[in-house]
């Protein structure tokens, strides 16, 4: 997890300090327009504009809260997994892991990307996790808002990470208010991760940090390979619970 650069990382820098003069900085992740179109299409099909089944006010509020907690927990474990250098040579997820680790070297670089290009980076993981589960649970109509808000929170999670690397003076007033009131991850909380890389893994609201911080220190170290299968199980908990209830 780049332990050798702790304390030597220029926070706001235009170029990766580990790229030597004359070298080009490679893009590790190439955004997929197909994945973006697929995820947005699924999101629209889950919306009340497509079908109002399951969209009662009470169920919408309940499922929105569940989705927020689901994505918050996802954000912490996602970060633990992709921060781990042991994942770098695994097919498919290896490039994403390297990209996350390069972020440690140049933390504020994500604020320099075009916001739409930046958001595309989360679409491929989203397509891999959500659409087939939404299809599998399609006869459980009360789950429709859950998947709708999960996709929405997935985007908000990625934006929250970006905003946590922006100076308060550069953020929208509503974002700053949410950060100050614990609704979104703040720079003050997230910068603790960039000091040691072994705590505060949440990149959404920060609510799950206390859980992951205790778990990684007392139960399973953050660099354990076991977090990969644990993360896979966590991502599929909704469909697992659905199948178990049938």
Image (cartoon, rainbow, N blue to C red):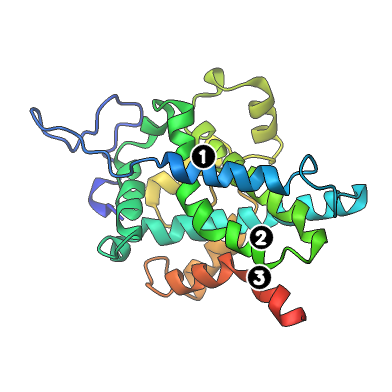
The residue pinned by badge 1 equals 161
Q: Which mark is residue 239?
A: 3
Label 2: how many Cα within 10 Å (few below 14, some 14–19, many 20+): many
- Image-based side of 227 in relation to 51, left or right: left
The residue pinned by badge 2 equals 134
Label 1: how many Cα within 10 Å (few below 14, some 14–19, many 20+): many
Q: Quadrant of the C terminus?
A: bottom right
Q: Secondary structure at mark 3?
A: helix
- Image-based side of 51 in relation to 83, left or right: right
Residue located 80% across and 43% down the image: 48
Q: Secondary structure at mark 1?
A: helix
Question: Marks 1/3: CA distance?
Answer: 27 Å
Disc 2 versus disc 3: nearer the observer: 2
240 shown above or below 139: below
Residue 8 visible somewhere in the drawing: yes
Q: Which mark is residue 72?
A: none
Q: Earlier in the sequence, mark 1 or mark 2?
A: 2
């Amino acid at each position: 997890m780049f332990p050798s650069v702790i304390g030597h990382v220029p926070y706001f820098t235009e170029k990766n300090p580990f790229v030597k003069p004359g070298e080009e900085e490679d893009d590790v992740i190439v955004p997929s327009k197909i994945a973006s179109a697929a995820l947005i299409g699924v999101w629209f099909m889950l919306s009340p504009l497509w079908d109002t089944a399951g969209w009662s006010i009470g169920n919408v509020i309940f499922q929105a809260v569940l989705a927020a907690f689901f994505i918050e927990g996802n954000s912490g474990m996602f970060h633990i997994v992709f921060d781990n250098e042991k994942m770098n040579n695994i097919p498919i997820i290896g490039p994403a892991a390297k990209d996350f680790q390069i972020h440690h070297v140049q933390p504020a670089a994500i604020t320099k990307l075009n916001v739409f290009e930046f958001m595309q980076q989360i679409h491929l993981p989203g397509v891999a996790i959500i659409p087939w589960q939404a299809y599998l649970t399609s006869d459980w109509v009360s789950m429709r808002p859950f998947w709708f808000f999960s996709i929405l929170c997935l985007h908000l999670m990625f934006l929250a990470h970006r905003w946590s690397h922006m100076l308060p003076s550069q953020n929208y007033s509503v974002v700053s208010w949410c950060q100050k009131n614990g609704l979104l991850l703040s720079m003050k909380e997230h910068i603790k991760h960039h000091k040691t890389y072994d705590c505060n893994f949440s990149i959404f609201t920060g609510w799950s940090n206390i859980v992951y911080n205790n778990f990684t220190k007392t139960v399973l170290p953050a660099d354990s390979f076991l977090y990969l299968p644990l993360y896979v199980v966590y991502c599929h908990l909704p469909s697992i619970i659905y199948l178990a209830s049938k």
